Amino acid sequence: MEVCNPMKNYTRITDSLRAGIIAALDTGTVVTDPEILSGYNKDASELRFVPEMVVIPKTTREVAALVCLANKHNFPLTPRGGGSGLAGACLAHFGGVVLSLEGMNRIRTIDTRNFIMEVEAGAISQDVRDAAAEKGLFYPPDPAGMDKSTIGGNAATDAGGPACVKYGTTRDYILGLEAVLPTGEIIQTGVKTRKGVVGYDLTNLLVGAEGTLGIITALTLKLIPAVPAATCIMAVFHDMVTAMETVSTVMAKGHLPSAIEFMDHRCLDLVGEMLPVALPQGKPSVLIIEIDGNKDRIQEEIRDIAGLCTAMGAFHIIPAPHDAEREKIWEVRRQVSLRIHDYAPLYVSEDVAVPLSAIAGLVNQLPGFEARYKLEIFAFGHAGDGNIHLNVTAQNRDNIPLVNQGVRALLQLVLDLGGTISGEHGIGLAKKEFIAMELSETSLALQRGMKQLFDPNNILNPGKLFP
Ligand SMILES: Cc1cc2nc3c(=O)[nH]c(=O)nc-3n(C[C@H](O)[C@H](O)[C@H](O)COP(=O)(O)OP(=O)(O)OC[C@H]3O[C@@H](n4cnc5c(N)ncnc54)[C@H](O)[C@@H]3O)c2cc1C
């Protein structure tokens, strides 16, 4: 853990610079009190960097003014949403100013005739979903941290979630953006229509760029009609291989669940007491399968799926036909990450994705890594996408070098299986030392060139993504 990492060639925030920044704001506010500043030193990773100042703008014009000052005086600017990221991407690695979007959280409009929402980037993601639901509409992306994350942060990380398997990720619901470029210019990208292919797709360049190419200040979101009902089951298997084969079987039979989540035996050791069934010895594994749609049809479909699970070897099916039971099942899933955090003093969160057919093979190899690198690895996540949260833990923080070796070896295995080192959490600071394992030199050079084109003075979120 580090506290600050000042880089020689950036300007420190002096009293006169601070006064200049405050003068550039109309209604926005700043944080300079060291105690409050220290609250902006973290996200959900283990990394810590205290910024020199936090600015909370209220308007896009104020954001642009701040970016102009950063270029003029050469200080780094780090965009921050809800601070729920898992890669240290919103941290002020080189000091300077954290630009928190928390003050820009208005839902500007919801157009129920055209199924679109205009929203400011600092709106909490759950509020966006709720606002759509109040109008009888549906915003599907459901990252698990959505009570804390912002819609701008979701866009900057292209957040996924359980519903991805059916509905896709955040980027699939962004029609256009309002953003401030690192040069201070304000740009509108994309369209307000359901389709649009004019020019390069700048919207999708900014989405997933982790705040390195522009500050997203507002978004035009695509909404869809509300889904009338949902139901789910939890299926308990004796082993992971059978559970994963069941995922492919269910989908091959023509079902497209709105979530297929899994938990391995280590996770069940932590949350097993929450289940209404005694778990057997060995390495049991569970799937949570949810179906949404027409009320009558989904009950019939979930029965078919439960039948498929049983035929594949599930020895217990826990049905959740009503919202209260469904909520209990999802609570088990939510508790997993919290309890892993409490369980181990050293915790590294990896979120790899592999082809569906490779999930079981990957999970089967985890015990070998555990023994070799003195780790315990908890595996859970989005089975329907092959997106596995591998929570690599150790009971002794002195093991960090060995744990890092283990993580690198694990990521290499994922790549050998045809996977990717991050399915949804992004690269930020935490994973940048691994990016060259996946991207070629040509790809990295092209991406660095794009960064240079957008941000010639390297003031926006410097030191992220690239080693
Ligand atoms: C309990 C828990 C569960 C989670 N579950 C999921 C999950 O299911 N799926 C998933 O994808 N992630 C998940 N996450 C990770 C996290 O919630 C997402 O990455 C989320 O999208 C981050 O949003 P944020 O607003 O908190 O962004 P921050 O953490 O504040 O920032 C993340 C990145 O976005 C940039 N950024 C933020 N706002 C802007 C903006 N307006 N303009 C430009 N750049 C910006 C930052 O600079 C940084 O690079 C989870 C996290 C936790 C703690």
Image (tube, rainbow, N blue to C red):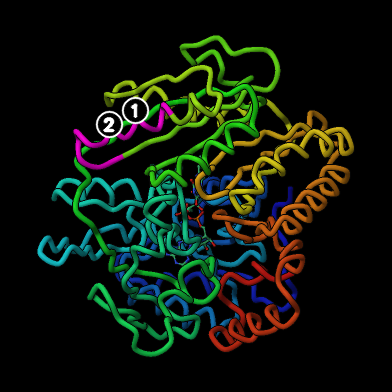
Q: Secondary structure at mark 1?
A: helix
Q: Assess whether residue 298 is covered by the magenta stretch.
A: yes
Disc 1 to disc 2: CB gap under 8 Å: yes
| Residue pictured at 44% horizontal, 83% vertical | 184
Residue 355 appears left or right of 291: right
Label placed on residue 300:
2
Quarter of the figure with residue 323: top left
Q: Secondary structure at mark 2?
A: helix
Whether residue 341 appears in this view of the structure is: no
Label 1 amino acid? Answer: Arg
- Span colored in magenta: 292-307
Instruction: Indicate whether 65 appears above or below 416.
Output: below
User: Pointer 1: what residue?
Assistant: 303
Q: Assess whether residue 17 is covered by the magenta stretch.
A: no
Query: Which one is in front, 215 or 35?
Result: 215
* Main secondary structure along the magenta-highlighted residues: helix
Instruction: Indicate whether 131 appears above or below 458.
Output: above
| Residue pictured at 32% horizontal, 68% vertical | 219
Disc 1 and disc 2: Cα gap in Å?
A: 5 Å
Picture mark count? 2
Query: Which one is in front, 262 or 107?
Result: 262
- Residue 168: image x %, image y %? 41, 57
Label 2 amino acid? Answer: Glu
